[in-house]
Image (spheres, rainbow, N blue to C red):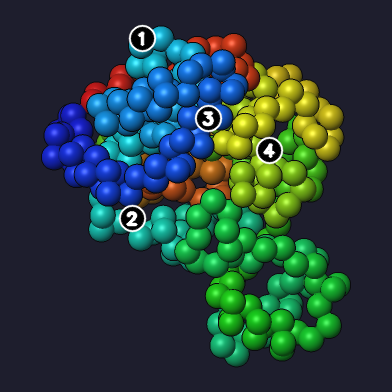
Amino acid sequence: MPSKGLGLVPRLRYLAGRARRIDVGSVLERATEASQEHGKWRPAIVADMLWQAGFKNVGFQDYIDYDFAILTKAERATYMTHPVSNQLSQKYDHPDFRHIFQDKVAFDRVFSEHLHREWMVVEAGNAAAVRAFAERHGTIVTKEPVGQAGTGVHRYHAAEVEDWDGFHRELLARGELLIEEVIVQHDDLAAVCPGTVNTTRVTAFFDGEQTHVLAIAQKFGRGAVSDQMTYGGFYTMLDDSGRAMGKGYDSHGHIHEFHPESGVRIPDFRLPLMDEVVAFVDRVARVVPQVQYVGWDIVVTPTGPVLVEGNWAAGVYENKPSATGIRTGHKPRYREAIGF
């Protein structure tokens, strides 16, 4: 197992990259947002944001999303941030194996037994097979092999396709090379948003012997093919029992006590089959043990959890004080499991 600690050189390299890419206008825009929301003086927030970014490993969006403007020094120290998460990914996710998680076709091949759904690859000359697959399932999801934040994911209904050869050519031309059967989610998830498959993000660390669950976020869609924020989705953090820790929120300043379409109260949500979820994450974490720090996207179905994808650059899902009333984050759990 790699040595503990994140190291000075990677951190300096990351900070140098951030300094080169800094968008002053974006910083000012975020500072204005925080100033208006929390009643703080904007110049003080700008200075604080720059200090936190330069010396405390806090991303500008982290500062806004997790309400750092109203937190104490001790409270801020409990929050996981994207710069720290990035350093963990670089240290604990072996570069020779990251491609499995970056390419959705490669991922489905390696993790096929954990998907619990049918899938196929679009290739030259297999238009008939694509048609047979789509007509067998009625509705299909296509994915571009490389994409982030839900981009490159599409949904089609077989009944609406008139020219299957043309449809096949268009899939190839657009690079939608992976086709999957639509996941049927558990009724408790469908009650919140039936039009989107609502995924659970379980961030975990495999130390070579044990899988440590670090944070659990429940994402909810708005009826689109994906529950990502780019499609209007939002999330809430779950505790170890699977119960929501508060209202839902996103990175665009929206807070949802109730789902905008279904009216379901988000703080009342509890993820079903939580024990099975934890056991499932332990199983999938052992498939590619060289990639230790992963954000697993799963869906709870009526028969148990199924795997959607794994993200070697796990990202961060954290508690938002203004939405939950809770002013601490998950960093102590990360430290206990990983030892940095």
Q: CA distance from mark 1 to mark 3?
A: 24 Å
Which is more N-terminal, label 1 or label 4?
A: 1
Mark 3 = which residue?
Answer: 32
Q: Dot 2, crowdedness within 10 Å: few (<14), some or many (≥20)? A: some
Residue 333 seen? no
Q: Which mark is residue 98?
A: 2
Quadrant location of the N terminus in the rendered image: top left
Observer-nearest of 30 and 315: 30
Residue at the disc numbered 1: 74
SS for callout 3: helix
Tell me the amino acid under the disc marked 2: Arg
- Sequence-first disc among 4 and 2: 2
Q: Report crowding for label 4: few under 14, some 14 to 19, many 20 or more residues within 10 A (C-alpha).
A: many
Question: Going 59% across and 77% down the picture, which residue do you hit?
Answer: 174
Q: Residues within 10 Å of mark 1 (few under 14, many from 20)?
A: few
Q: Which mark is residue 321?
A: none
Viewer can see residue 44: yes
3D distance between C-alphas at marks 4 and 1: 31 Å
Numbered tag placed on residue 220 in the rendering? 4
Identity, as a three-letter code, of the amino acid under mark 1: Ala
